[in-house]
Structure formats: C-alpha cells, structure tokens
Image: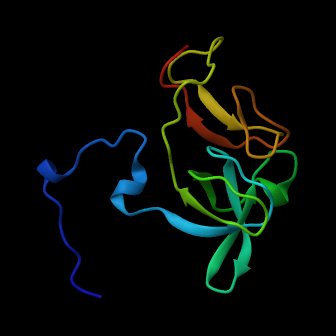
Amino acid sequence: MGVPRKFMQSEIGPAVDIPWSQGIEAIVAATFTVAVNDIVIVNGRSSSLMQVRPADADAVLTSRGMLYVAVTAGTAGARITMVPWRLIANVDTNGSAVGDEVFMSNTAGGWSLTAGTITVQVGEVLVVS
C-alpha cells in the first residue's frame, strides 16, 4: 500500500448515475433474486464474495447493516454488481417536495416516500415528477 494521494479541487467533479466509473463497484453473490436499483443488504459471505439480499424495512435483520444499490440483476447464486449510492431517475415522486426524505420500504429491495415499519432513510427527492 502506497502513500495516500491528495486530490486537487479540479480533479473532483459530480458523477451522474455512473458511480461505478470511479471504481467503487463491488461484485457480490445474491442470495435471493435482486433487480436493478434494488436496495441490498450484506447478509454473509461465500468464499471471497460478500453475499447480499434485497433489504426491507419490516425486520431488523433485513434493514440494519451495510446497504448498497444493485446495478445489475440476478437470481439466487448469481454474481451481481452493487454500488454504495446511485442517482435513480424516471420514478414517480409526485406528492413530495425537493429535499424530502426517501425511505426503505417494507417491500424487499424497494423504497418509499413514507417510512416503513423500521425507519431507514436511503435518500432524498431531487426532482418532483
């Protein structure tokens, strides 16, 4: 491991829906079916891979821990790609306002504009559609 590198302000810029271009994606093993843009939670490991499943807010076991967003889909046993954050577009945010909280829902992998059984904020509204 080398000496940490300092970044110049000119090297830092916004990324729109392509965080994996910055090298922060991870290949993991799905333990349940995962869809693109599902919120996933780490629930173990298989060999050298983390295992993930869709997160949901109706139980502590599936709502607390390391959360990520799936950028590829797969069934149980498949390798998928996940990132720590993602800008998700073309979703219905009517009834909300810019800056409103977005929560993990009680539906596996999903999100909602209202809190689930266990309140876990996973984002905020950037555009009202």
Q: Is residue 74 left or right of residue 93?
A: right
Q: Nearer the viewer, residue 97 or 77?
A: 77
Image vertical order of residue 93 relative to residue 5, above or below: above
Q: Residue at x 73, y 39 (%)?
A: 110
The picture quadrant where one finds residue 115 is top right
Q: How many marks?
A: 0
Q: Residue at x 56, y 68 (%)?
A: 27
Q: Residue at x 60, y 24 (%)?
A: 91
Image vertical order of residue 29 relative to residue 82, above or below: below
Image vertical order of residue 21 relative to residue 49, above or below: above
**Colour logic:** rainbow
Q: Residue at x 77, y 38 (%)?
A: 105
Q: Nearer the viewer, residue 50 or 97?
A: 50
Query: x and y percent of residue 47 in the render?
Result: 67, 86
Query: x and y percent of residue 22 in the render?
Result: 34, 58
Query: x and y percent of residue 82 in the render?
Result: 56, 58
Q: Is residue 59 left or right of residue 81?
A: right
Query: x and y percent of residue 123 in the render?
Result: 57, 37
> Looking at the rendering, in which quadrant would you find the C terminus?
top right
The picture quadrant where one finds residue 119 is top right
Q: Is residue 121 left or right of residue 64?
A: left
> Looking at the rendering, in which quadrant would you find the N terminus?
bottom left
The picture quadrant where one finds residue 62 is bottom right
